[in-house]
Image (cartoon, coloured by chain):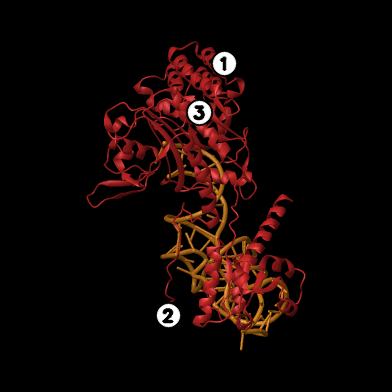
Chain colours: A red, B orange
Amino acid sequence: MAKKPSKLKARLPRGFVDRSADDIRATDEMLLKIRKVYEQYGFDPVETPAFEYTDCLGKFLPDTDRPNAGVFSVQDDDEQWMSLRYDLTAPLARHVSENINEIQLPYRTYRAGWVFRNEKPGPGRFRQFMQFDADTVGAPGVQADAEMCMMMADTMEALGIPRGQYVIRVNNRKVLDGVMEAIGLGGEENAERRLTVLRAIDKLDKFGIEGVKLLLGEGRKDESGDFTKGAGLGAIQIDMIAKLIDTKSIETGPKSFNEHLDYIFDEHPNISYAGADLGDLVNLVQSCGYGTDRIIADPSVVRGLEYYTGMVYEAELLFDVTNEKGEVVQFGSVGGGGRYDGLVKRFTGRDVPATGFSIGVSRLMTALKNLGKLNTVDVVAPVLVTVMDGDTDALGRYQQMVQELRHAGIRAEMYQGNWKKFGNQLKYADRRNCPIAIIQGSDEFAAGDIQIKDLIEGKRLSEEIADNVTWRESRPAQMTVKRGELVAKVSELLGQQAEDRRKAAEA
RNA sequence: GCAGACGUAGCUCAGUAGGUUAGAGCGUCGGAUUGUGGCUCCGAAGGUCGGUGGUUCGAAUCCACCCGUCUGUACCA
């Protein structure tokens, strides 16, 4: 027997997803709410493309001319490497640098877009996801950072996350730089170890203080028995860092934060200076009424190691997020950002200080689903005008009914499948959750009537009817009205259905 | 990347001392009912048993490698 021709297998690349109608509508609604906050703060949109030249993203391996792992890259026909953007910040820096003479600084701007990362996907972690950024370019002052923090807080609340269920944590990178110096890790020769220490600190929420101590010292073994080498610090150094980041032991108001730093590091000048800067930020937001329930200083915040130079901040959710199996998942931050004073300078040579943050839209959406704050926007499926006769005149009449409904603002469509099997038309309407079906056969046409069938009510009635003959002949929840009353009756019925849904939601 | 678990129909899963033609439920499609959704009944389609190679008279089953999924971990702008 001949081998069956092998069919092409339809498959989605791993780490990518197709988005459903519900997802798209829910995302649109989220984006709208976020955008409203950013606009209110005086930010304007700007959009950059998904591709950039790789060198503009800063992603080349030092000893080859091939792009780093982690980014999706292709070579253009002139051999130049291009990459899909992996965040929205580097492309913004490119845009600003390229148009620096036309752009009025400080430049306040926002944008939402897809970003791509070529790394191992996981549950809730994809290789394409959406970020929504806001940045202020050309503003050196701490007030610009303070504004970012407040805007993040406002955004969380605009999305329906109640106060107390989220928090914005702020730190100043220079505090950490000073700390490194204070524990003897200053200088070029310790760069690698500094990174290890920062990475360890960053894992506080994941492994707790004990886990971080292990990573700062010899190293840590994970559940599968795999061993992670630590930073190899001494006991005294580890203790100082542990005290620094153990936020449970300190008040995070502006004054006590500095006292905390001075207590551990004995008024080390760099640390005190950076701490005072952070204190100014906290003072600023508190004078605007943003207390420590919304924005707090937290010396354990690290963020990205690549380009942040000063303040760093991140938004964390304080409620438990469960997955579809009902297990509580480690959620981490849903957004973050900071000051990146060097990014524009790379292109222009000019000092152009900037600060901004990014919200992980896709991640936040999963969390909102959990919180029940994701209004699965109740988009009502269209009214279905069924087809009883297939001649051109009749089809014209059906189409006309559809248009009448549409012009009255009612979602409607005519059945486009094989009309000869009438049962299938109602089956289609049922599966699509159509609220109403319109039926006009030759009998009704001759009498100047139409049938309006309430599919929602009919579905309810079906539970009470056992045999099929009764079910068919009783024609449940169906009424005959004059053709001229089409729009009026349909509107009335839709109104009743909406009312029923509202009541059901309340109950 | 590293470590571990897993991979049988669209979905959830049976199926091993290697042995005819690999099964079930749900779903899909068709019919009973060509002008009425649901229920019920009848019938059908759907599988390279993740892939490749090996051991064997014979492999879904045993071995090796590869791919993929899940868990942990590393990296993460």
Do the dots labelled 2 and 3 sit on one chain?
yes
Q: Which is nearer the N-term, disc 1 or disc 2?
A: 2
Relative to the observer, which residue lies in front, A214 or A373? A373
> Compared to A260, does A435 lie above or below?
below
Relative to the observer, which residue lies in front, A31 or A198? A31
Disc sitting over residue A479 in the figure: none
Q: Nearer the viewer, mark 3 or mark 1?
A: 1
Amino acid type at mark 1: Ser
Relative to the observer, which residue lies in front, A449 or A54? A449
What chain is tagged by disc 3?
Answer: A
Disc sitting over residue A256 in the figure: 1
Q: Which is nearer the N-term, disc 3 or disc 1?
A: 1
Disc sitting over residue A2 in the figure: 2
Do the dots labelled 3 and 1 sit on one chain?
yes
Label 2 environment density (alpha carbons within 10 Å; few <14, some 14–19, many ≥20):
few
Residue A476 x, y percent position in the rendering = 72, 72
Q: Residue at x 56, y 82 (%)?
A: A389
Secondary structure found at label 2: loop
For marks 2 and 3, give the CA distance: 64 Å
Q: Nearer the viewer, mark 1 or mark 2?
A: 1
Q: Is residue A234 visible?
A: no
